[in-house]
Image (cartoon, coloured by chain):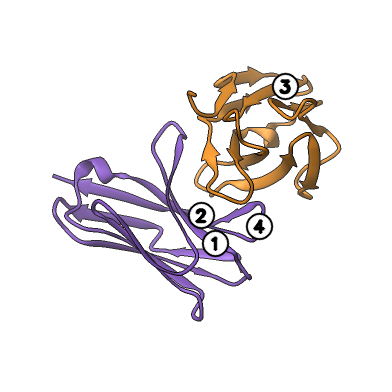
Amino acid sequence: DTGVSQDPRHKITKRGQNVTFRCDPISEHNRLYWYRQTLGQGPEFLTYFQNEAQLEKSRLLSDRFSAERPKGSFSTLEIQRTEQGDSAMYLCASSFGINEQFFGPGTRLTVL
Amino acid sequence: KNEVEQSPQNLTAQEGEFITINCSYSVGISALHWLQQHPGGGIVSLFMLSSGKKKHGRLIATINIQEKHSSLHITASHPRDSAVYICAVSNTDKLIFGTGTRLQVFP
């Protein structure tokens, strides 16, 4: 297993466009987390899944954001009508239960 | 006030120095995590601990549950230790992160 992977690694988009990111967790991990990190700050929690069920969403996750994990394996995070304030690094992590989380390399989003 | 506070925010050291980074938290936790982040964004988990002390190579992490405080120590620091070190806490699910400590070790 090659660890957690994310695609794309970088995304530049114009304000108002929709973007979708993908995360592939470590295969035996049942939990998948999305975090967002802005420059100079620590990551902030967005949402997490246990298998295919989305168990918690942060208040940071406005109605423009939606995440799915349809078969309990990979997950997608979609941002609709992007705004400049959405520019950040989007990090995915996975774990087996409440054990150590393993992070992907992140997707850096720039909204022009 | 943030739920997880780290100090210092920035730290410079000469190669070989002993380094300490501190973390205080104000919420109930099931575990505390120390993470390392290099330029480019990749985050690596260094330690996950819920009591006492753990050691891995030149890195030592301690936690005092009563005082809600943890420290990360680096012995015999090396330029390759230069990175951002992030403290995070968890209570069965998501991580709550500190803002990180940027460490630069000069030869």
Q: Chain of mark 1?
A: B
Which residue is labeled 2 in the image?
Answer: B99
Q: Nearer the viewer, residue A63 or A34?
A: A34
Q: Chain of mark 3?
A: A
Circles 1 and 3: CB atoms closer than 8 Å: no
Tell me the kind of residue under disc 3: Thr
> Counting residues from the N terminus, which is met first, the one under dot 2 or under dot 1?
1
The answer for how far apart the CA atoms under marks 4 and 3 are is: 28 Å
In the displayed structure image, the side of residue A41 where residue A51 appears, left or right = right
Q: Chain of mark 4?
A: B
Circles 2 and 3: CB atoms closer than 8 Å: no
Disc 2 vs disc 1: which is toward the camera?
Answer: 1
Which residue is labeled 1 in the image?
Answer: B31
Figure chain in orange: A
Q: Chain of mark 2?
A: B
Name the spot of residue A63 as percent of width and height, x first.
Answer: 86, 37
Disc 2 vs disc 4: which is toward the camera?
Answer: 4
Tell me the kind of residue under disc 1: Ala
Q: Secondary structure at mark 3?
A: strand
Q: In this rendering, do the residues under marks 2 and 3 share a single chain?
A: no
In this view, the residue farthest toward the front is: A28
Q: Secondary structure at mark 4?
A: loop
The answer for how far apart the CA atoms under marks 4 and 1 are is: 8 Å
Name the spot of residue B70 as percent of width and height, x first.
Answer: 43, 68
Q: Secondary structure at mark 1?
A: strand
Label 2 crowding class (10 Å Cα cut-off): few <14, some 14-19, many 20+?
many
Circles 2 and 4: CB atoms closer than 8 Å: no
Q: Secondary structure at mark 2?
A: loop
Q: Colour of chain B?
A: purple
Point out which mark residue A20 bears.
Answer: 3
Q: In this rendering, do the residues under marks 4 and 3 share a single chain?
A: no
Label 4 crowding class (10 Å Cα cut-off): few <14, some 14-19, many 20+?
few
